[in-house]
Image (cartoon, coloured by chain):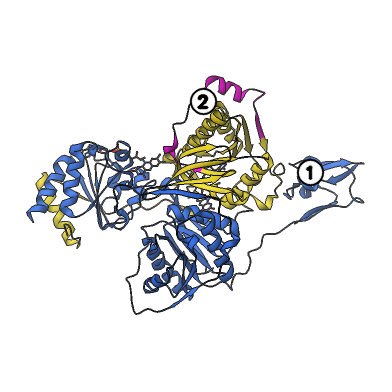
Chain colours: A blue, B yellow
């Protein structure tokens, strides 16, 4: 815990320490210094102030623990209605690379009900082993139930690394889990590598709305835990010759208290927009905010076989649903081609699409920031360019 | 209802740049604001107080300058403001931040509802809400865009990637809110005068006041550490296409074909 010890023989009551303490944790009593434990934060200011060697500190020293026995790169497999979320395959692809570098195994951790049959798919996509917690209470996500099951698994198996998708579900559960297990947690990573010297996980993530990238490490806790932005990591192609053990772990689910009660789950009318796995995206900005604008965009999207997407402005103006918004507060996408039509290129928008392989930007304004990240720059009116492109596509 | 609102003072994101020489954030001349979603959290708290009675206490951890933020919240209608400020709190990750905020909430005593933003626009982690909830061992509801508080429970609509969920939780509960929840009110002139007057209900608490050791908060108490920051590389080799719309269209499709991008399949 730590303490400040006062040598009353040496203390001459000079009051320096009492005055140096920022927290009023040293009082003068009977012309001697007296330590008030409750108010002391162990900052050490008093120790430096004493000229008579009357104060000693027993201070806790932060030490990097030895974690060399921690093994395994774990992926938390998100599922909805018994279907594995695509992020799970992306994370397995990423985990495979990390595990190979470390010479460790990839473990897929699945929480759900009756999913054992499906687990082989996770092996085919890169896992060496799959561990399930199988319980009816895990069929539908609830914070405390899932947190309990996963934290018990982690306590049983003591992995080295744990990856969780930075979906709504992942970002609801991961911080709760990290707080429960005393783990550092890096949010929304877009790049994960192993430090060649220290052999620890380097976790790189955007912050400040994508203006800044930060590389973060967790030296003081295991597993090194990160949430990973969906749509960034590349899944491995399925290899049905891969085999691995699928086991069911025993977790006492009765020991968990769930606070919440889900009353209803409402799915949107428009189903099946999967921007994150779209190969071609045709995105519009403010100038498509009209019926004509949306139809010009849609015709081109249909002609190239792409999905329509947009900036936040278009969603706010009510011309396309929020499920089609790309950016910091929308979807992250990485198509083969991203057509940015009438999009200025705000950082919050770029944050969601700068992983695209090729970016084609069409904008009236030659100084629009979107051109800075464009492979093909077209300075012009989208109401002329897009119809011309649609015609050219149809004529092929 | 006793309501606590967590608010963070943040730089206005779009202005932040990195000094190319030092690699540090350039904060000079960058305006500070209340984290946008936190204003929605406060508005929700004020509306619930108007309906059910009770008090709204704002807690913010930050440098002395964050007093502005606490005062702005009082001017909007909060009853009491706590600024957690101490050099020992500086450099905290979300683990250490949630320790400090959690200890401060505990010191306040009884509470029914804690409101926070879903995410701060600078750190962007969205981790504080759930971590404070876990610290206090209470229920959490995140991504909330509709909220109905009653005695003893709240009913919320949580946004999911596809659709939403209606969910109920007993109090005490921590809720993280989205901007879609409501339209925050503006501070009033009387509010500003009261918030900045001598009898203003603002307190500043340091590490000793909330009963933590220096080693448990701030940089020293953090489990993650930033080892490098840099500006994302933006530059691509941009090729400009010029001429009539028809010429541009033909050139672009040909260029993409050469890059083996298959359109229209
Ligand atoms: C916290 C926060 C989160 C945000 N999250 C997101 C997000 O997730 N996604 C997002 O997109 N935005 C987000 N934003 C908003 C973002 O800052 C921008 O306001 C938004 O992206 C701008 O959209 P825009 O490019 O459509 O509009 P504008 O910036 O208005 O740009 C319109 C562009 O169209 C060009 N133009 C006009 N007419 C034509 C024409 N006929 N032909 C060709 N070009 C034309 C103009 O030159 C201009 O460059 C966020 C903002 C904040 C503060
Ligand atoms: C570039 C960069 C990257 C970082 N990455 C990580 C990381 O990956 N993991 C990590 O653990 N830490 C990280 N940090 C540290 C983190 O930003 C701080 O711990 C910060 O105090 C809280 O995190 P946040 O801003 O992400 O808050 P969020 O969790 O996004 O905030 C959600 C809500 O919590 C409340 N809240 C947050 N901070 C305060 C506060 N100080 N006072 C009152 N209420 C508050 C507000 O209601 C806010 O809307 C990073 C910091 C920087 C500068």
Q: Which residues are magenta?
A: B176-203
Asked if the residue at label 1 sits under 8 Å from ligand 2, the reply is no
Tell me residue A206's x, y (percent): 43, 51
Which subunit holds the residue at mark 1?
A
Is residue A122 at all visible to an observer of this figure?
A: no
Residue name at image x 65 percent, y 42 percent: B104
Secondary structure category for the residue under label 2: loop
The picture quadrant where one finds residue B53 is top right
Tell me residue A131's x, y (percent): 48, 71
Label annotation for residue B187: 2
Whether residues under marks 1 and 2 lie with C-beta atoms below 8 angstroms apart, the answer is no
For the view shown, which residue lies furthest in the left direction?
A: A395
A308 or B1, which lies in front? Answer: B1
Residue name at image x 63 percent, y 39 percent: B111
Label annotation for residue A25: 1
- Choose mark 1 or mark 2, whichever is in front: 2
A95 in relation to B179, above or below: below
Residue A59 lies left or right of residue B5; in this view the side is right
Is residue B57 at all visible to an observer of this figure?
A: yes
């Amino acid at each position: 815990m730590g303490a400040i010890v006062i040598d009353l023989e040496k203390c001459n009551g000079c009051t320096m320490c009492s005055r140096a303490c920022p927290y009023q944790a040293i009082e003068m009593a009977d012309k001697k210094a007296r330590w008030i434990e409750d108010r002391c934060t162990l900052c050490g200011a008093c120790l430096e102030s004493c000229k008579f060697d009357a104060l000693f500190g027993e201070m806790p020293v932060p030490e990097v623990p030895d974690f060399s026995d921690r093994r395994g790169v774990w992926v938390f497999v998100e599922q909805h209605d018994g279907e594995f979320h695509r992020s799970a395959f992306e994370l397995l692809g990423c985990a495979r690379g990390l595990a190979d570098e470390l010479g460790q195994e990839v473990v897929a951790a699945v929480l759900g009900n009756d999913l054992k049959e499906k687990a082989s798919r996770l092996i085919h996509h890169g896992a060496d082993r799959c561990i399930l917690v199988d319980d009816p209470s895990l069929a539908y996500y609830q914070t405390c139930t899932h947190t309990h099951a996963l934290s018990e698994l982690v306590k049983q198996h003591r992995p080295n690394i744990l990856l969780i998708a930075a979906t709504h579900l992942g970002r609801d559960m991961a911080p709760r889990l990290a707080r429960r297990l005393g783990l550092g947690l890096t949010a929304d990573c877009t790049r994960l590598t192993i430090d060649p010297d220290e052999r620890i996980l380097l976790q790189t993530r955007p912050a400040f709305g994508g203006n800044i990238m930060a590389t973060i490490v967790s030296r003081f806790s295991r597993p090194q835990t990160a949430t990973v932005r969906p749509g960034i990591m590349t899944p491995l192609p399925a290899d049905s010759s891969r085999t691995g053990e699928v086991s069911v772990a025993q977790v006492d689910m009765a020991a968990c208290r769930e606070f919440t009660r889900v009353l209803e789950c409402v799915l949107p009318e428009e189903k099946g927009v999967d921007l994150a796995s779209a190969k071609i995206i045709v995105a519009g900005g403010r100038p498509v905010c009209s019926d004509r604008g949306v139809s010009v965009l849609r015709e081109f999207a249909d002609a190239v076989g792409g999905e329509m997407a947009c900036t936040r402005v278009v969603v706010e103006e009510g011309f396309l649903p929020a499920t089609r918004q790309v950016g910091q507060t929308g979807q992250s996408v990485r198509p083969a081609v991203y057509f940015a039509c009438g999009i200025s290129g705000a950082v919050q928008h770029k944050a969601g699409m700068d992983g695209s392989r090729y970016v084609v930007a069409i904008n009236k304004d030659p100084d629009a920031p979107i051109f800075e990240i464009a492979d093909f720059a077209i300075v012009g009116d989208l109401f002329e360019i897009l119809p011309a492109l649609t015609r050219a596509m149809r004529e092929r | 209802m006793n309501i606590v609102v967590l608010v963070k003072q943040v730089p206005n994101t779009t202005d932040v740049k990195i000094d190319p020489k030092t690699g540090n954030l350039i904060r000079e001349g960058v305006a500070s604001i209340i984290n946008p979603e936190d204003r929605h959290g406060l508005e929700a708290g004020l509306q619930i107080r108007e309906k059910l009675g009770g008090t709204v206490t704002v807690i913010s951890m930050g440098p002395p300058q964050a007093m502005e933020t606490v005062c702005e919240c009082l001017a909007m209608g909060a009853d009491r403001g706590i600024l957690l400020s101490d050099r020992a709190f500086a450099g905290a990750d979300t683990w250490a931040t949630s320790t400090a905020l959690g200890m401060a909430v505990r010191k306040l005593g009884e509470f029914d509802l804690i409101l926070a933003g879903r995410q701060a626009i600078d750190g962007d982690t969205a981790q504080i809400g759930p971590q404070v909830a876990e610290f206090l061992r209470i229920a959490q509801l995140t991504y909330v865009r509709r909220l109905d508080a009653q005695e003893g429970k709240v009913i919320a609509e949580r946004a999911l990637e596809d659709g939403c969920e209606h969910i109920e939780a007993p109090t005490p509960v921590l809720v993280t809110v989205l901007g879609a929840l409501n339209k925050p009110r503006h501070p009033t002139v009387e509010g500003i005068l009261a918030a900045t007057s001598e009898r203003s209900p603002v307190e500043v608490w340091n590490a000793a006041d909330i009963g933590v050791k220096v080693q448990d908060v701030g940089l020293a108490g953090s489990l993650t550490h930033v080892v490098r920051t840099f500006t994302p590389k933006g530059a691509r080799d941009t090729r400009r296409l010029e001429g009539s719309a028809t010429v541009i269209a033909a050139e672009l499709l040909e260029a993409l074909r050469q890059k083996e991008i298959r359109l229209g399949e």
